[in-house]
Image (tube, helix red, strand yellow):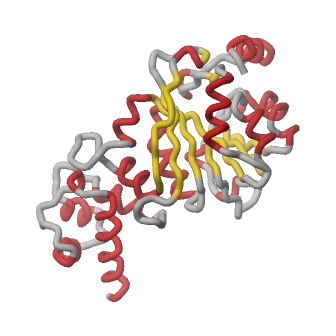
Amino acid sequence: MNKQEVLSILDEYGFQAKKSLGQNFLCNEDVIGDILDLAQLDKDTTCLEIGPGLGALSEKAVLLSGNYVAVEIDTRFQPRLSEVIEKNGGKVIFKDYLQLTKDDLPDPDFAPEVILSNLPYYVMTPIMLKVMKDFPSCHKMVFMVEEEALDRIFAKPGTKQYGPLSVLTDLFGTKKKCFSVDGGSFYPAPNTVSSVIGIDAGGENGTWDPEWIGFVESAFALRRKTLVNSLSSSGKYSKERVLSALKALDIKESVRSEELLPSYFVRIYEVLNERKDEN
């Protein structure tokens, strides 16, 4: 889909981009092809796309994958997405993904192997965390994000940007920035540069547990406080329990979350929950 095709579709259906939803429609065929190359879809692949918009990516992804589902918040796009997705065997759910439950899915056992999304900045973090919680068996995620968001996704311990998103994406799998996309590849053109990132399941830890999400978020809840204070403030663990876990792992009592490598959160979580289960 190129810019002229986007303009034609907008005119045909009487659509306008909504700034409130962060809508900028992809109109660069090369970028679309590069994203699909990263996704590696085939007829054995189950694919979920979040926010298909006008269907620039969808109209090709639905033909490549064996089971394709899209979730779109904007019901105005129903006639357009029916034409390019549902008539080609896919399914579209018109709902805010952040409000999506298993009951909304075409099959309660729906488990996408590949997830695609162009993520607006204002909902990037909650959507990425919900995806990892909802679909722990996902093999590959390909996201387009604003380039400034990379600092949060790829942040290292000891930096200001290091937080739950960087820790949890590290634990989920291997992530990398694949390529940049300039504003001219969208209509309307944003004043920012975007980046396409890939996350392949199977990180350093080798496994993924959705329960780590709430735990890591609690660990960073009080960024200026120690890890002990942050975790105990959640009400799930006492200070004594957290101190005992840190001692067992030979971690100093005064440690703050931003000092710890992602793997340490898993080790602390395991010790805390083993002890909890025993009592």
How many numbered markers are drawn? 0
Quadrant location, the N terminus: top right
Instruction: Residue 125: give x, y in percent of width and height.
Output: 44, 43
Quadrant position of residue 31: top right
In this picture, residue 77 sits left or right of residue 23: right
In the foreground, 114 or 93: 114
In this picture, residue 59 sits left or right of residue 272: right
Instruction: Residue 274: give x, y in percent of width and height.
Output: 35, 81
Q: Is residue 199 visible?
A: yes
Instruction: Residue 251: give x, y in percent of width and height.
Output: 17, 68
Q: Is residue 95 visible?
A: no
What residue is shown at x 46% (from left), y 37% (from top)?
A: 177
What residue is shown at x 70% (from left), y 40% (from top)?
A: 94
What residue is shown at x 88% (from left), y 38% (from top)?
A: 87
Q: Is residue 245 above or below residue 233?
A: below
In this picture, residue 83 sits left or right of residue 71: right
In the foreground, 112 or 198: 198
Quadrant location, the C terminus: bottom left
Instruction: Residue 192: give x, y in percent of width and height.
Output: 45, 20
Quadrant position of residue 50: top right
The residue most toward the bottom is 278
What residue is shown at x 29% (from left), y 64% (from top)?
A: 264
The residue most toward the right is 87
Q: Is residue 115 above or below residue 249?
A: above
